[in-house]
Image (spheres, grey):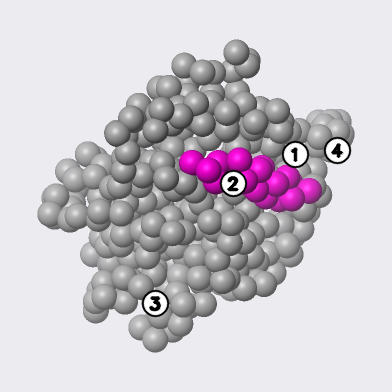
Amino acid sequence: MMEFIPVNEPIIGDQEKELVLSCLNTGWISSEGSFVEEFESKFSYKCARKYGIAVSSGTAALDIAIQALNISKDDEIIMPSFTIISCIHQIVRIGAIPVFVDSDLRTWNMDISKVEDNITSKTKAILVPHIYGLAVDMQFILDLAKKYNLLVIEDAAEVIGQECRTKPCGSFGDISIFSFYANKHITTGEGGMIVTNSENLNERCKALRNLCFQNENRFIHEEIGWNYRMTNIQAALGLGQLSRLEKIIHRKKEIGLIYTEKLKELSDFILLPDLSTEYSSNIFWVFGIILKNQEKFKSAKNLSIFLKENNIGNRPFFYPLHLQPVLLRIYPHLGNIKLPISEKMYKNGLYLPSGLALTNDQIDYVCSILKKAFQDF
Ligand SMILES: *Cc1c(COP(=O)(O)O)cnc(C)c1O
């Protein structure tokens, strides 16, 4: 049997190592230091933005975004249920109300055709995460936002370097955010970025990241913020990674393509992600599969166990937010909500090893085990 294949293993190149070492040698190891500003400016340029604010995680970026846009108690935020819990932390703390929309089984993103029906006089914003590698059709969202005067928060954590109709993901929201967690397209270990074109929001986000210290009377505070700063060491690592972004995307797409080719013959048993839509081509943050109605495994949990027994790391899909025990306690009305596609995706979905250190031989092995799994049928 093959040695255990982790679900994700990043690659840290020589350039990253050199940059981190040179950062250490300067002694500027906190968030003060030139690498942070250089990373902010190069990253925001890549996504066609005026301002970038580096932070300690993607979750921190979302917290700041919600706060900076003055979302308040009882405001309604339209968002998918099928996303990471990070999207909702600050919405909960503020006392705003999430309005969950079901997903689209083709793209695994929020079903944008269901957004307009959920807009009410209380709706303040649409929060749009791009899920797993295909972009949401952002023009459609922006048109709706304009028509109803809504804010857009774009969560581009899983699509660094992705485009939607030739414009970069991260260029669409009033505020857009990214994550540089170790499994994202580029990583700083832990880290995140907020990008915007608004000078005012840039100032607000910078203040919120840094305990709302003020420029003139530093220790007199008008607002409560966070220490969500990124260190100069992380930014050095990020700069090295950023310089390889095109190559990284190329390899991620290649991994997706190889899996797709090899698994096509199992299409009676598993639903594969689409390689592209009319407005974006999949950059495969992860390679997910969804079990179709079939007898052998019944749910992704059983397939996951089978894969682990064969030394293949894998992860379940997101657990829909409308089913989360913690959210059901805070928002009891969620108990009445049914979002069948999100529920089905969770029950039947998992993702395969998809990290940059994955070799073609390992992909071969994973596919051969999957074929074995279904061969009795
Ligand atoms: C990873 C991720 C985040 C959170 O990023 P962290 O850096 O892990 O806090 C937020 N949104 C989405 C869609 C993600 O995939």
Relative side of 126 to 5, left or right: left
Q: Which quadrant of the view contains residue 366?
A: top right
Kind of residue at badge 4: Gln
Q: Which residue is mark 4?
A: 15
Kind of residue at badge 3: Leu
Task: Compare marks 2 and 4 and give the one earlier in the sequence.
Answer: 4
Task: Compare marks 3 and 4 and give the one earlier in the sequence.
Answer: 4
Give the extent of the magenta segment: 247-266
* Quadrant of the snapshot with the C terminus: top left
Relative side of 26 to 65, left or right: right
Cα–Cα gap, marks 3 and 2: 38 Å
Relative side of 289 to 358, left or right: left
Q: Which mark, by number, is residue 260? A: 2
Cα–Cα gap, marks 2 and 1: 32 Å
Question: In this view of the protein, can residue 83 be seen by the observer?
Answer: yes
Cα–Cα gap, marks 1 and 4: 8 Å
Cα–Cα gap, marks 3 and 4: 42 Å
Q: Which residue is mark 1?
A: 237
Q: Nearer the viewer, mark 3 or mark 2?
A: 2
Secondary structure of the residue carrying numbered label 2: helix
Q: Which quadrant of the view contains residue 127?
A: bottom left
Disc 3 crowd, CA 10 A, few/some/many (<14, 14-19, 20+): some
Q: Is residue 153 above or below residue 158?
A: below
Q: Which mark, by number, is residue 170? A: none
Q: Which residue is mark 3?
A: 150
Task: Compare marks 3 and 2 and give the one earlier in the sequence.
Answer: 3
Rendered residue at 45%/74% (across/down): 141
